[in-house]
Amino acid sequence: MTKSAEEYNALTCVQLRAICKERGLVQKGVKKEVIERLMQDDTVSSSTALPPPTPAPQPEVKEDDEEEEDIGIILGSPTKVLAVTKSAPSAPTSIDSNDQDYQDETHTCHLFEGRSKFLSPSGLHFIANHQYRGGEYTHLDNLLNPFWTYLTELLPLWLAPNMVTTLGGMHCALAYGTLWYYCPDFDTTPPDWVVMLAGYCTFAYYTLDCMDGKQARRTGSSSPLGQLFDHGFDCICTLFFVATFSSYLEIGGTHWYTLLQTSLQFCFFMAQWEEYNTHVLPTNSGKWCGVTEMNYFSALLAFVVSLIDREAFFHKSMEKTVAPFGLTSVLPAFVKDVELRHFLLGGWGVMSLILISLSLKRVLFHPRVAGDDMDASEIRFNRINAMSKLASPFLLCVAAFIVPPEFIRTRYLSVSLGCVLSLLTKKMIVFSMAKMPFAILQTDIFPFIIAAIWIRCDTRLTKEGGDFVLGVLSIWYAYRMLRWVNISINQICTKLGIYCFRLKKRDD
């Protein structure tokens, strides 16, 4: 029995989904989408109510059959194409059963990964049709946009956009390796020229990061793979930023270092988590503060501190810092003896909490999570489900604080923690594009958590033993991250029929 739009609107979400279940329709989506799906089914049902005068067997539809008229979405690899029409067929076919699998699963709750470690056919379908939506431009973005465009015009047309991204990542790798050599555990200040090199590499990395998308549009090679490459490099390059700040602040072997790395990487993960739930990636907070300002400020700061006596400047107390400005009397007593470097890190910690709170607010009150057309039980489930995706990175950050920093080499803790958090962030980036479920407890977190508890609780474990455990974990997580990225890139390239570092289309 068909209903009007008003009659469907009068029903609750639970009742609407019960009707969808009875008819064998997809139950996911907001109330408006479910009503449209039911009304479309009513239209199809009414058009097929009268049987044809001479019944004929329905021909079987093959996966490689092509529909020439009214094609809505093209699915499949270059060698196997499946056409899905915008209007529903009058009889069930294999296309319907396949289309049932292609549904947004971001609101699905999985405790463990299971088979969702890599991209599913449904996920590859959504990636092939993914459209990136970033935040608004800041004033500095608008000011520098002609500069980035000018530099992009200087690039050769045969240069693939992913190579531009890789060149930016190589700058980070160069500076990170140099900092590692001169400041292996962030407890000694590196030479001035090394800090200046870090500042240049920060500037070059972000400038190239702003050019890769322009090069993609210039060469007509924009693809969802570019987003994975761009943001995938961003999340591993956070290790370079942590190394730069830690080297001239000399906070190795302290919980201050753990605070800096966990807060920075967790905030980056939350940005991808926000896109996963809202389909919009936050890149700024207002018109005056965004990722452009943060990156170029980091580069400028590195240039400035390379010209001063960093140890004398950052190690002095807040009382001595503000004394030349006559502000000693306004400082609370508990702040006067705090070193400037620790005061700055405390300020960053407060800023991180503000960013996290704003991200939580945007997600928990977003229409996709708490829409006006949703009932209370659905909103409650969506919010709990969204929050549960933060469990794995949060547990990793807690485990990092369990490890006694004075007992192990900070570099080993940094690399092992950085690689596993980067792996989780890359998964969130890809699963957001693929609309796949991100499990609450990722299996990759358990080796690090177990190692952290072991190092903390086993009194028989020596410092060398703790370093060995974290060193092995560093190698393991680096391998896991590279393997997962390699498999995902190959899956996406095969689906889209493209090469990763070449503009030419694939022939297979």
Image (cartoon, rainbow, N blue to C red):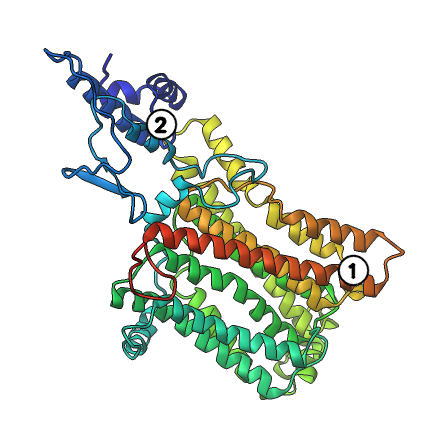
Instruction: Give me the residue at 69% from left, 68% from top.
Output: 411
Q: Position of residue 217 (x, y in %)?
A: 27, 64
The front one of 185 and 284 is 185
- Judged from the image, the secondary structure of the residue bearing numbered disc 1 is loop
Classify mark 2: helix, strand or loop: loop
User: Tag 1: Cα neighbours inside 10 Å, few (<14), some, or many (≥20)?
Assistant: some
Q: Residue at x 15, y 13 (%)?
A: 55
Residue 96 place in picture, x, y as percent: 30, 28
Q: Quadrant of residue 257?
A: bottom right
Q: Quadrant for the C terminus, please.
A: bottom left
Residue 123, percent from left and from top = 41, 43
Determine whether label 2 and label 1 are within 8 Å by CB.
no
Q: Is residue 499 left or right of residue 295?
A: left
Residue 320, how many percent across, how many down? 70, 80
In the figure, is residue 477 to the left or right of 460?
left
Residue closest to the eye, 360 or 121:
121
Quadrant of residue 229 within the rendered picture: bottom left
| Disc 2 from disc 1: Cα separation | 51 Å
Apparent side of residue 143 relative to residue 450 in the rendered image (left or right): left
